Image (cartoon, helix red, strand yellow):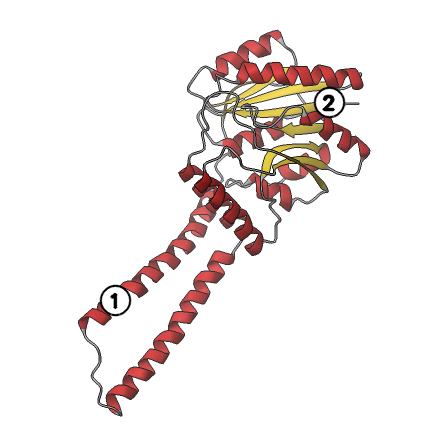
Amino acid sequence: MGLLTVIVPCYNEEQVIEIFYSRINEIFLEMKKQYNDLKFQLLFVNDGSKDNTLPIIRELAKKDDQVEYVSFSRNFGKEAAMYAGLKNAVGDYVAVMDADLQDPPEFLIQMYQELLKGSADCVAAKRETRKGEPVIRSFFARMFYKGINKISKTEIVDGARDFRLMTRQMVDAILQMTEYNRFSKGIFGWVGFETKWIGYKNVERAAGNTKWSFWKLLIYALDGVIAFSTAPLVFATIIGLLFCVIALIMIIIIITKTILLGDPVAGYPSMICVIFLLGGIQLFCMGIIGQYLSKAYLEIKKRPIYIEKEKKVRVK
């Protein structure tokens, strides 16, 4: 049956690590009853946690050979943690899931069964409802998915989680994308392969607090737009052309009214309003261009996606 790797990115998750470990172990035991030859690799990626997350993981690794870990020198973000997990995973099948139990571990059984059928290369989970989330956050999340699917050629499913089980072939394809600015939801879609979706209702965290504030989610959404669409640049170009046309029309109107009708040109207040309007639009368009340039700048520097400080993983 081979080896199944479960990657678990962790950042300050001391309150849920042991709860998660107990739950996932129950799933492993249940799967072993059905598939005797199936083996497991539980790979924690400590993303520079400042609490007792790493010591707890170390203790689990000492008493259970299935538990392995990679620990970063500092916090590099969840995207870097997922990439590090994929890079160190040795399984024939590789899953990514959160430690807070918002990704139901029991879905692994169904995901694995679907992959064994051979009809899909990836089985992923998506939330069908956002019950329990703040209303404003849910609204903006829905607007983001609607918007990005209109301006991007890469399909990003509304409610999609990072929780998924993939074949080795798909994992190897993802690892070929070594970009520094990562947006995994887009990367999963961009590499292609057949994906089967499992819908479920939103689940609350088992313990602790979310690390994703509204501001962080907004920045993450902007990263996704910039990574998988050039539509904002097109928008800036169209806005520039539109105002050039408007300016030309207004010049013709003003000249006509002044020469033919003797109508004096409006003074200071109207001029100030126009200057502020055009100045704001120019700064907005420059900001769009600046975002793309900043991402290109970070890519050109070729900095590593993450830096390991400590790890205990098996050799591929």
Please name whichever residue, 257 or 307, is drawn nearer the observer in this view of the structure.
257
Against 111, is 233 above or below? Answer: below
The residue tagged with tag 2: helix, strand or loop?
strand
Looking at the image, which residue is at 45% across and 29% down? 211
Q: Amino acid type of disc 2?
A: Leu
Residue 279 location (% of width, % of height)? 30, 62
Query: Pointers 1 and 2 in contact (CB under 8 A)?
Result: no
Quadrant housing residue 311: top right
Residue 246 location (% of width, % of height)? 37, 75
The residue tagged with tag 1: helix, strand or loop?
helix
Residue 116 location (% of width, % of height)? 79, 30
Give the CA distance from mark 1 to mark 2.
66 Å
Instruction: Report whether residue 301 is seen.
Output: no
Which residue is identified by label 2? 3
In front: label 1 or label 2: 1
Crowdedness near tag 1: few (<14), some (14–19) or many (≥20) residues, C-alpha within 10 Å: few
